[in-house]
Image: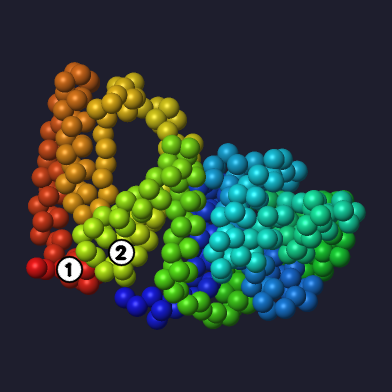
Amino acid sequence: MNTKDLQLNLWSLLSSLAKTLDLMSPEVADHCMRVAYLSLRLGEELGLSRAELRDLCIAGALHDIGAFSLHERLDLLAFEEKRATQHALAGHLLLKDVPLFSRAAKMVRFHHLPWRKGAGAKENGVPVPRGSHIVHLADRVAVRISRGPAILGQVAGICKSVTKRKGDRFVPRHVEAFLRIAAKDYVWLDIASDTMETSLERSLGHQTIGLDPDMLLSLSRMICRIIDFKSEFTATHSSGVAATGEALARLAGFSPRKRRMFEIAAYLHDLGKLAIPSEILGLDDLGTPQVFKEIADTPRGLVLVTGPGAEARNSIGIVLVAGMLVGMKAPGAQIIASVTFIAILMTILIQASTTKWLAEKLDMLEEE
């Protein structure tokens, strides 16, 4: 694959990232999309340029990217937010090194900063982008939208709450723009239906971005950090796998292009963890039996290796765990060992018959 020829629709990328962040819990479902939509409508009402609207949509869709735990996300759903600056700074640090997101990163950095009658125009001497204050207002409006009553019946209460904080929390000009768009029923009906995404996509147009190798690598590193930072125990896991995988690929004689693809795949290998609340990643939070905690703490614990032949090595590790359970006479150990044997046998049979075919399809087969 020649990554220079790879074109990606901007909306497809944004919506995928936003929806993945919102998979954490039904309580936060669609929140990022709503903030992006409201930010866009506010930006349009304020007369922002097309480029500014694009960055505003990016900032709105990814504004909570630095909130790694479900607890943080739920805290942010309170209209009177607390401890909001930490996740905003984390989001800025995640986004700033991706060229596509670098301008939006500055908006995310200050998106919970109150206006304070003009004092919020700067923070510690640093000018605050106006987009930050727009996203802040959009975010606070979005958290006031309830899934219970009909949305049009909530508008008056939302407008009252926003107006009450005009000048103190929110920029007066932005509040006035919000009140104008709040009078348009279609804005709220969009939010309450599938047309919200259609409106966002139409407003952004069919903008595509070229994914050269550097852009693809920076995106994968950003996603890797989001995954790994969900737990202190995995903070450097994927980056370590990537470094190890790239070094092994170099020693094995793979071309620079394939080594780069190995590195990107390693950064993304735990992608499924994005939808898992960090609170259930630990043994204690899972309510795991004490025997598994003893296995995890013992020097002979399980080591999983990622790379060529990883499934075989993982299988060996799983067999060792099953054997340890039998040796410790843990409840149900015999059944666990039997099921483990059958599962590994089926995995080996299936993998052995498909590995070459898959390598050919991916253009990664190198025969002597």
Left or right side of 306 for 288: right
Secondary element under disc 1, as helix, strand or loop, is: loop
101 vs 366, left or right, is: right
- The answer to whether residue 183 of the structure is visible from this angle is no
At 45% across and 74% down in the image, what residue appears?
A: 211
Residue appearing at x 65%, y 66% in the figure: 103
The residue type indicated by label 2 comes to: Arg
Alpha carbon of mark 1 to alpha carbon of mark 2: how far?
Answer: 14 Å
Q: Residue at x 31, y 68 (%)?
A: 256
- For the point 72% across and 43% down, the residue is 81
Instruction: Please name the amino acid that badge 1 sits on.
Output: Leu
- Mark on residue 304? none
Query: How many numbered badges does the structure rendering display?
Result: 2
- Which disc number belongs to residue 259? 2
The residue closer to the viewer here, 100 or 276, is: 100
Instruction: Locate residue 340 relative to residue 129 in the image: left or right.
Output: left
Q: Which residue is mark 1?
A: 365
